[in-house]
Image (tube, rainbow, N blue to C red):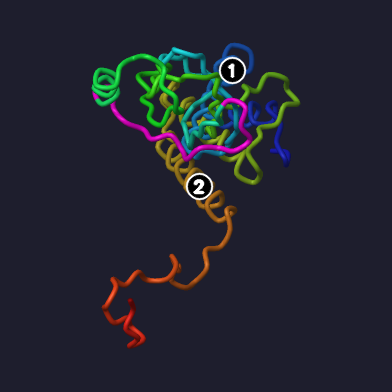
Amino acid sequence: MAFPSTFLDVQTAVLQKARLDPVLDAQRVRDWINQTYSRVCVETEAIVATAQMNCAVGAYSYTFPTAVARTKQMQIRPFGANVLNPPLIRTTLDELLNRRQNGGDAPLAGQSTHYALLGINDFELWPTPGAADVILLYFVQFPTALSADTDRPIIEEPYASKLLEYGALADAGDFNGDPSTEGWAADYQDWTTRYMQHLERKQGVIPGQFHQWGDTWVPAGMSGYDGYVYG
């Protein structure tokens, strides 16, 4: 198979290894490749993007963007401000309902601090926005499906070719009862693990010493580790 591989290269490899019909099974193979592609990108969280959601005064229920596969973090940018608030706190719908009942549903002076995501796209905020604040989202994104024969996945090589090939082969083997199916599935899992390890190492090396969180707090009148009496 060519390196780096195109969509057509992966299709050809799957058709040949699974001994499928190039005419009758071509669309199935394309679908299996794209299903694998989407699954890999979501499960490894390979594609992280940012987006904005606009709040409306007096509205606490919103439709979550369909492009979001998994939420990483969210922050509020208050209307007319250039600074961001601390990250939104995820909570339950029960807590939001109790807060609304105790604090009223009228828009409050401050910005939203808590959220709950229900199902696929019901997004609830508290407090109810009192201004047209903006929510900045960091999220895992679904990939754009491969379509043209010359398309290449956004995943880096040498992982892309093997992930898409073995993932599609596992589906193909299940389809036609190929005895190699178990081996293909194991190879897919192996390459998935390798890719996740690659992404983790790509983030950088963690220093090899204990992290220092700042000076130790010592109550007034008590001796610190250096023998000095504080306070």
Indicate the position of residue 96 as horizontal and vertical percent values. Answer: 30, 23
Judged from the image, the secondary structure of the residue bearing numbered disc 1 is loop
Horizontal side of residue 141 vs 116, given as left or right: right
Instruction: Name the kind of residue labelled 2 in the image.
Output: Met
Q: Which residues are magenta?
A: 79-94
| Main secondary structure type of the part rendered in magenta | loop
View extreme (front): residue: 231
Which residue in the structure is indicated by mark 2? 196
Dot 1 alpha-carbon crowd within 10 angstroms: few under 14, some 14 to 19, many 20 or more: few
**Residue 92: percent from left, percent from top:** 28, 27
Q: Horizontal and vertical percent for residue 57?
A: 49, 14
* Residue displayed at 32% across by 31% down: 91
Indicate which disc, 2 or 1, sits on the residue closer to the N terminus: 1
Image mark for residue 77 = none
* 83 to 58, vertically: above or below: below
Q: Residue at x 56, y 63 (%)?
A: 205
Report, in whole angstroms, how far the alpha carbon at label 2 lies from the one at label 1. 33 Å
Q: Nearer the viewer, residue 155 or 64?
A: 64
Q: Residue at x 63, y 18 (%)?
A: 22
Q: Quadrant of residue 123?
A: top left
Decide which of 115, 187 is in the foreground and name it.
Answer: 115
Q: Secondary structure under badge 2?
A: helix
Q: Left or right: 13 with respect to 61? A: right
Q: Is residue 84 magenta?
A: yes
- Determine the residue positioned at 53% across, 27% down: 135
- Give the label, 2 or 1, closer to the camera: 2
Q: Is residue 74 visible?
A: yes
Quick one: which residue is furthest to the bottom in this view? Answer: 227
Which residue, given by chain and number where applicable, does mark 1 sit on?
21
Residue 79, quarter of the rendered image: top right
